[in-house]
Amino acid sequence: MAIDNSPAFDRIRKQLPGVLITLGLVGCLTAVLFLLVWESGLAHGSIAYLIPVVIAATRWGIVPALVAAVCGVFASAFFFYPPAYSFRVKEPQEVIDLILFIFVAVTVSQLATRLKRQLEMARQREIDLRDLYAFSRRLAVAFDVSDIHAAIEDHLASIMQRHVVLFASARDASDSSGRRAGTAVPQRVLSEVAEVASGRRDTAGGAIVTAEDGEIWLVRAVSAKSLEFGVIAIDLGHESKERSDELRIRVDAVLADATATLERLGVAHAISEARMRAQTDQLREALIGSVSHELRTPLASILGAATVLSTAPALRQEKKLTALVHDVRDEAERLNNDIQNLLDATRISSDGIKPHVEWADPADIINSAAERCRHRLSDHRLALDVPPDLPLIHVDPVLVQQALVQIFDNAVKYSEANSRIEVAARTRDGQLHISVTDQGAGLTLTEAEKIWDRFARGERHAATTSGSGLGLWIASAFIGANDGKISAASKGPGLGTTISIDLPVSQAALPQLESGADE
Amino acid sequence: MSEPAPIVLVVDDEIQIRRFLRTGFELNGFVVHEAGTGAEAVRTATLRPIDLAIVDLGLPDMDGAEVVERVRSWSSVPIIVLSVRSAEAEKVRLLELGADDYVVKPFGMAELLARVRVALRRQMRAVSGEPTVKAGPLTIDLAARAVLLNDKRLTLTPKEYRLLQVLAQHAGNVVTHQHLLKEVWGSIHVHDTHYLRIFVRKLRQKIEPHPDTPKILVTELGVGYRLVQSGAEGDEGAWSDNNAQAKSET
């Protein structure tokens, strides 16, 4: 039937249970009162009919309350007022009763409705606050910008119970044309997001976009004040105009709370700072990388040309000129080492180090490091103490060698010409222990703490020795990449330094030679 | 000199590098051809007789490895590659592709010349079929399968001899771990680097006057081994004249 679906019928149907229960209440009360009047001979029980009125008003609203009031008046008229069992009204008392009942019904039901609405609001508010609290807690432990963005996104999604996508920037929107996992965002919405994120459109309240598939999306900046928080797109589905307006107001409220939290925590500042720092780091690494590469290419020509000159027959008799050429070559070599350090440092901090491990003979590594440094070590007496029966180690030999070269370099730099540099290798507690001991400047307690830092330079020597302060940092990174440990010890300033490397020897893991290997 | 001057092809896109290489080689009695691109290098190697090629890896038109591969496909001319440091895997790949040796940039002329002489000598020996290889006090007679240290015959196990033989066949040049393992133990053992380490240790005890500081069978870290030939002392480092100085001081 057509009437079944009309709103009026709907409303009646909604009131029906309340009205029926109210009628039941009135009936029960009448029966009880009737018994009481019968037993005790009370004259007036009509005031008791306020009970169902109040119950109905608080429970089910104004309609059942009015029904209770009217039924109550009729029941008392019928049963208790003379003449009994008749609706005829003899006294004005009943009219007053009726007015009183109706007044109570209306007032109480309105009070109750208002109370109920406030209660509901309070409950919703409590949920929102709890979410907001969880949100701010999550923000507090967020490590980076993407954590913060994910927190905003999840917070909105859980409060709105809708599909929410947050775009950090205009580029994010243009990049992620449907790419982000599980979030198919229509193209029309994406372009709107890009517009808003680039600041070209002022959307304090957000813009409603109807996507290609007919779904309605709300697009707005998270904060009207700062675009740092990004732009959100909320899938409202196929909602009516009124309902989507309602949702929009709700989004406003939620976002107002969220941005207040974000602002209070200084998140905008943190985001922009983190972003700037990341960009600066990237830029710096890229700059160091490309500058080092660009510097190295001409250096190869300079060094090569200098070595050609130093052996040229025309210069052979010219002692002073030959010395100059040697200076060019030595300085170019030093520059090349510095550049190599910068390149290594960029490699460590940008890509991380990927060791190519193989079984290697520690003696080979130490000899090859000494060989590489022979020119630099020529003013010092290098003493190697490497037993012939050291176990093989499973490392990247090139990285360990480069770490040793850095340590040798450091020893040469901070000790007098002609002093001894001792290199010893031993196995101890399943570790291969390599130590490099010089008789040089030693370390103060504060220096010993700092020498592994990037760009660490000993203050006592800053004026007299050159260097970038990268060497030992690189060495420790290279040893660390081989699961090794590096440490420094010194008896004090002027008493020399011992740098020790410990590398694991896993005897059990070393595959045995197959019996046929030596045939 | 009755011998004709050796012809070297220098392949590098940097004109300054080519210039110093040309000067350096010419001062040492070489004839130099230059190529700035990979295509030009392949063309020159095809059209003109050359005794040796020096190939830089960073070429504008093709990877240096491709030049090595293309030239190697029809010619056995020695190829020395100019590479950068921290690229051991790449060095190994180039050696496997057929390069004879590599020099790390930046390098000194003396170091490159030493490598070039080793490569030329090896080529000459291959052509003439010369059966003995001398490395310091060590003599390896490949025809008689005899190894002599200071003219005294050494007793080597078959595997030790095989290892030394492969190294001697490439005397002066670096031989990769993989190549040695394959030649001595067979292809299933190409990754068993520890076999090599243990046998090299044993072999050094027998052939090196000072096994702790090997001078004949030297390690190229992360790449392989090299049998250092007598008369090719340029192997000792980038700046050999300086090294000589250092040696005389100590």
Image (cartoon, coloured by chain):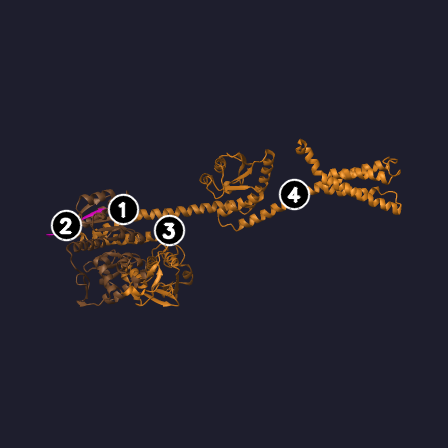
Give the residue pinned by disc 4.
Answer: A121
Chain of the residue under the numbered disc 1 shown in the image: B
Instruction: Report the magenta residues as a range.
Output: B1-11
Check contact, mark 1 vs mark 2: CB within 8 A: no
The numbered mark at residue B5 is 2
In the rendered image of the structure, the colour used to display chain A is orange
State left or right for residue A216 relative to residue B129: right
- Expressed as whole percent of the image width and height from the top left, the position of residue A73 reads 82, 38
Q: What residue is disc 1 on?
A: B66
> Mark 1 packing: few (<14 Cα in 10 Å), some, or many (20+)?
some
Q: Which mark is residue A346?
A: 3
Of residue A440 and residue A55, the one placed in the foreground of this image is A55
- Give the structural element (helix, strand or loop) at label 4: helix
Residue type beneath disc 3: Thr
The residue drawn where x is 17% and y is 67% is B151
Which residue reaches farthest top? A2
Label 4 environment density (alpha carbons within 10 Å; few <14, some 14–19, many ≥20): few
Labels 4 and 3 in the same subunit? yes
- Rendered brown, the chain in question is B
Image point (21%, 51%), residue name: B78
Q: Nearer the viewer, residue A463 or A358?
A: A358
